[in-house]
Image (spheres, rainbow, N blue to C red):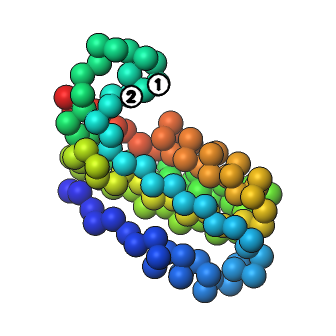
């Protein structure tokens, strides 16, 4: 069943009140959404790929927790929060939110790229609907 998306304002307030906040000089967020253009067209240039009408999305929570734990081992990373949707999603629906806080920009950018990449490749199943 599709879940209600979180508030980034509330997430940032929570993060800034966390005991790790004094170590953090930057927060980055990622908001993945269901797009109308198929993955085959966007990533591989397949011009004959039809438009997406939605997505079936699920995830393995234990795998997500393990990937988050690994991301915390990265240099300068002190705060991570992840939310993933579930179910049949429509174009424009939120798939995921990730918030990462760390000491300096290069560390936070690298950690966001690492975490979102691993979640997408190791933790979720997504099937485009046409």
Q: In percent of the image, x 32 and y 31: which residue is there?
A: 37
Rendering coords of residue 38 (x, y %): 33, 28
Task: Give the answer, above or below, for where 123 lies relative to 24.
Answer: above
Q: Residues within 10 Å of mark 2 (few under 14, many from 20)?
A: some
Labels in figure, total: 2
Task: Give the answer, above or below, for where 10 lies relative to 89.
Answer: below
State the mark number for residue 77: none
Q: Is residue 61 visible?
A: no
Task: Give the answer, above or below, for where 10 lies relative to 122.
Answer: below
Q: In percent of the image, x 24 and y 22: which residue is there?
A: 50
Q: Is residue 89 visible?
A: yes
Rendering coords of residue 41 (x, y %): 38, 22
- What SS does tag 1 mark? helix
Q: Which residue is mark 1?
A: 43
Rendering coords of residue 73 (x, y %): 74, 57
- What SS does tag 2 mark? helix
For the residue pair 130 and 82, the one nearer the viewer reads as: 130
Q: In percent of the image, x 46 and y 71: which residue is there?
A: 8
Q: Quadrant of the C terminus?
A: top left
For the residue pair 30 and 70, the one nearer the viewer reads as: 30
Q: Quadrant of the N terminus?
A: bottom left
């Amino acid at each position: 069943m599709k879940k209600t998306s979180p508030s980034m304002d509330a997430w940032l307030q929570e993060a800034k009140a966390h005991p790790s906040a004094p170590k953090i000089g930057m927060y980055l967020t990622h908001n993945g959404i269901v797009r109308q253009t198929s993955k085959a067209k966007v990533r591989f240039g397949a011009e004959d790929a039809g438009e997406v009408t939605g997505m079936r999305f699920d995830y393995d929570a234990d795998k997500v927790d393990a990937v988050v734990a690994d991301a915390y081992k990265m240099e300068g990373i002190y705060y991570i929060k992840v939310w993933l949707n579930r179910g049949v999603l429509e174009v424009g629906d939120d798939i995921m939110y990730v918030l990462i806080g760390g000491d300096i920009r290069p560390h936070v950018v690298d950690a966001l790229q690492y975490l979102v990449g691993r979640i997408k490749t190791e933790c979720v199943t997504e099937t485009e609907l046409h």
